[in-house]
Amino acid sequence: MERDSFKYTSRVRVVTVSFHSEAILPEMLNSLPNEVEVVVVDNAESTTKAMQALQAQYKFIYLPLLGNKGFGAACNEGAKGATRDFLFFLNPDARLTQGSLHYLIQALDSQTEVSAANPLIRGGRGRHEFKYRSVLLPRQEWRQREIPRVTCDMPALTGSALLVRRDAFRDVGGFDEKIFLYHEDDDLSIRLRRQIGPLLFVPESLVDHHAGHSSGRSAPLAFHKAFHKAQSRIYAMRKHNIPRAVLKTLASALIGLLNPSNLVSRRKRLQAWGFLVGSLKAKHI
């Protein structure tokens, strides 16, 4: 497959967003085919020296930002000026398996109306995952939880390993930069499906993803992430005309506060509290 894959993977720009992710980036970078173009966008100003040391070793394009503008905004920066056919947004704590990118591109080449695609995601505990639903969609558009065994259409896609046609990404305006963190992938993929063409799930393509490790797992950071997740959820639900956005998010926050794991985990407690505070402060955004 290696010789045949070159004609596919040489058409890809990989964009990854780092926020104190320098320790885990090498594993992801080592998993990429040599011929892809790689852009690392850095949302943490304090890591510039460490990232420059990695750049010398792995030869990627390094884009340090002045302050953390959010995940979607960083992805948009990484996509600017792209000339290759495809953009592949990949989390720094993800790792490609052999042929995974090849299979994704092959699927899009065979169905030219398709705008974007996801691989099968294998989590840290070996569980296979895919995005079968979104809070931005009515329930009748959700798929069944069972993982499909063949390539099929999807209602939304995850941004942890998202292959999208460069022109399609440009035509819908990229990620919504008003969404700081979380649900920006739902919003983008739904707009792609509605404005450009279908979304695909390609189970032949497998990507390992140790979710939550790209920026560490400290308790204060868990609060910060959960706060923005609640704010992003309410903004995005309103944008997609999902009724009772604040009420639904507050209900989820209250359920999260009652989780028994909060009693033994400070990180879980702060995560639940951050989601509630974000829900309350998002009432008027």
Image: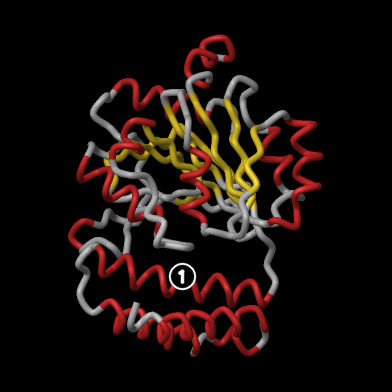
Q: Is residue 268 visible?
A: yes
Q: In which quarter of the view is residue 133 placed?
A: bottom left
Residue 132 in the image: state x and y as whole percent: 34, 54
Question: Image quadrant for the C terminus?
Answer: bottom left
Q: Residue furthest top?
A: 3
Q: Is residue 214 visible?
A: no
- Nearer the observer, 78 or 260: 78
- Taking the image as shown, residue 134 lies to the left or right of residue 31, namely left
Q: In which quarter of the view is residue 125 placed?
A: bottom right
Q: Is residue 243 above or below residue 18?
A: below
Task: Indicate the colouring scheme.
Answer: secondary structure
Residue 207 in the image: state x and y as whole percent: 54, 40
Write the residue at 36% across / 40% down: 201
- Taking the image as shown, residue 33 lies to the left or right of residue 10, namely right
- Taking the image as shown, residue 203 lies to the left or right of residue 265, namely left
Q: How many marks?
A: 1
Write the residue at 55% across / 70% down: 225
